[in-house]
Amino acid sequence: MFHPATQSLRSQVRLGFWLAPCALALFVGCTQLGNPEDPGSGGEDPASAVPFTDPLSMPATPTLSTADFNSAETCAGCHPNHYEQWSTSMHAYAVVDPIWRALVNIRQEEFNGERDRFCTQCHSAIGTRAGDFDPNFSFDDIAPITLEGVTCEACHKVQSLARTYNSGHVLDPSGPIRGPIRDPAPGATHESEYSPLHDTSDFCGGCHDVLEQHGLNLERPYEEWLTSPAAEAGRNCQSCHMPIYTGVAAAVPGVPERDDLHLHRFIGVDMPLSDDFIVDDETRALLREEITTLLRSAGSIEIDTADSVLAGEQLDVFVTVRNLIDAHNLPTGATFNRQLWVSLIATDADGNVLYETGHLDDVGDLRDHFSTLDPYGDSDLIRFDSGFVDAEGNPTVFPWKAAEHISNSLSPLYARTFTLFIPTSADTRGPISIEARLRFRTFPPFLLRALGVGEFVEKLVITDIDETSGTVTVR
Ligand code: HEC
Ligand code: HEC
Ligand code: HEC
Ligand code: HEC
Ligand code: HEC
């Protein structure tokens, strides 16, 4: 009747730990993320020496020069649409992102600059290979092209792929611009070459699968995709994150209209939050709308209960959350930053709250281990994001301190059912109404405050991916 993964949340209460659902990995299939093929894998001691350099993506001495790359600005005149779309994307924001910078600065201090290149190798592959992020670099000294983050030529000067993780792209600044067009029209200032690689998920995996320096698997949408129904059906990352539209690829006379251009807004779950990065409200509203639409397609929540309950008895509520994405987990990517959880409230006919979970404390945090006001105050909390524990078994937000990465995320199309218990008393008056929501946000407020970027807390948006409700009569 219910999904076999049905489990009692009561048993989690005793564990009193924010990652408790994974202690029940046997029942719910939680994933312990590790990676067998990484050369630095198996580093049980996070501080153990895995090379801090890599000949391809973190070279000890520069392998190329920032001067050999063209700024996105130089493409804008002929590719105004691509430029405009890209310029408000997380790719363009990758090196100015204050949240990223705050973490990079902390890591820089902790390792005295020794591991600086690690966090920069994907956020700016060009700058890292050009020596802009040598140990103890300062953000004041990096080249303009490096500030452009994942800029046009970080993708379009990719000649081949050496591995599908940790900045695996081989860049060839002197080579042609590579892309999906087989018959490029004349009129460009660059040579063009058709590249089948750009139309594969592997291409995205080269940056989107992230292994920490000690081998711990941090992000792995590509690996999740490899065994997904979408992969089997031949649908790649681009099909959802770069949807196609009709138009001209270049605003140059004689260029034909094409019906398979790829949107470069790279919509996911987040958008640049700095006011000076996106200046107009219209663009912000557009991005927010597209993010919301994508998120609403991602999952569903259902509740199931008996039709009635005897006053004074406990009501069992079965909550089922389903991943509707057939391409990767829900959530995916930076799941250790994200929050995805169930909020459920049950009230009686007089409006008394009989039961509540997934509600926030007064400073906007979930009542988990990290809540300053009500730590562990919500022992039933159902969540699908992930967390790190250090070698002593304590939760940590820093990947480099993590001994384990424990994930509750749902595999493609997978559903998981939980049971919640709602108490009633002899004078509870029915009907009882139950409202449940599947909620998402990009960062927990406590983290932004701790990183010194608390000004973004008020810009965090909670998106209700799905919601449902029901009533139960009281006998
Ligand atoms: C292998 C490539 C790679 C490396 C190495 C890498 N990142 Fe990222 N980073 C990404 C990708 C891809 C995303 C987008 C993932 C997502 O949004 O789910 C991302 C997203 C982020 C975000 C979220 C940004 C936001 O505002 O939503 C933060 C913060 C971040 N990275 C910090 C770091 C830090 C700190 C390090 C070093 C410890 C690091 N990254 C190393 C590829 C990388
Ligand atoms: C003087 C105008 C001009 C400039 C400047 C320009 N391009 Fe192009 N580009 C074109 C034209 C014309 C095409 C062919 C479009 C078509 O056939 O639909 C093209 C095609 C492309 C393609 C597709 C290539 C393929 O074969 O798939 C990419 C990718 C591209 N440009 C990227 C860039 C980037 C990145 C820059 C900046 C570094 C840039 N372009 C600068 C005019 C220009
Ligand atoms: C069927 C459509 C679809 C395909 C194909 C797809 N995605 Fe997604 N992606 C989504 C949806 C929906 C979300 C929002 C829910 C989530 O975060 O899982 C998302 C979210 C993301 C995020 C943001 C996650 C976060 O919380 O920070 C990243 C990064 C991402 N996808 C990368 C990829 C990569 C890489 C591929 C290919 C390997 C891919 N996606 C293929 C639909 C898709
Ligand atoms: C994160 C990587 C990435 C970045 C950054 C990027 N592109 Fe692309 N671009 C692609 C991919 C991938 C495709 C082809 C998608 C496919 O075939 O599925 C593409 C396609 C194109 C095309 C061919 C027409 C089309 O829409 O398919 C042009 C032109 C282009 N990009 C220009 C640009 C310009 C100009 C910039 C910077 C303003 C830029 N791109 C930034 C990955 C990127
Ligand atoms: C050169 C490295 C690189 C490549 C190649 C790359 N990405 Fe990214 N991508 C990043 C980084 C870094 C971020 C996060 C930037 C930040 O938030 O600071 C990101 C962010 C994103 C996001 C936004 C996630 C969110 O949290 O909303 C999406 C969606 C995305 N990428 C899709 C793609 C797709 C699809 C491809 C393949 C066509 C691709 N990327 C190729 C490095 C890359």
Image (cartoon, rainbow, N blue to C red):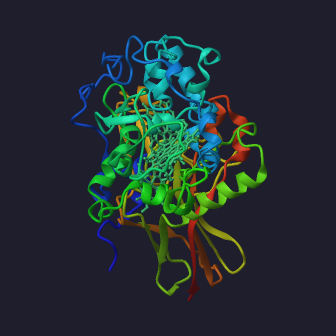
Q: Position of residue 285 (x, y in %)?
A: 72, 56
Question: Is 459 displayed left or right of 249 in the figure?
Answer: right
Q: Position of residue 335 (x, y in %)?
A: 46, 46
Front in this rendered view, residue 337 or 64: 64
Front in this rendered view, residue 342 or 348: 342
Q: Is residue 299 above or below residue 176?
A: below
Q: Quadrant of residue 351?
A: bottom right
| Residue at 57% from the left image edge and 21% from the top image edge | 105
Q: Quadrant of residue 35?
A: top left
State the count of labels.
Answer: 0
| Residue at 77% from the left image edge and 43% from the top image edge | 279
Q: Is residue 367 above or below residue 298?
A: above
Q: Position of residue 150 (x, y in %)?
A: 52, 35
Asked if residue 251 shows in the view, the reply is: yes
Front in this rendered view, residue 137 or 73: 73
Asked if residue 382 shows in the view, the reply is: no
Q: Is residue 462 above or below residue 179?
A: below
| Residue at 32% from the left image edge and 58% from the top image edge | 28
Q: Quadrant of the C terminus?
A: bottom right
Q: Quadrant of the N terminus?
A: bottom left
Q: Quadrant of residue 114?
A: top left
Question: Is 349 displayed left or right of 344 in the figure?
Answer: right
Front in this rendered view, residue 146 or 255: 255
Q: Position of residue 201 (x, y in %)?
A: 35, 50
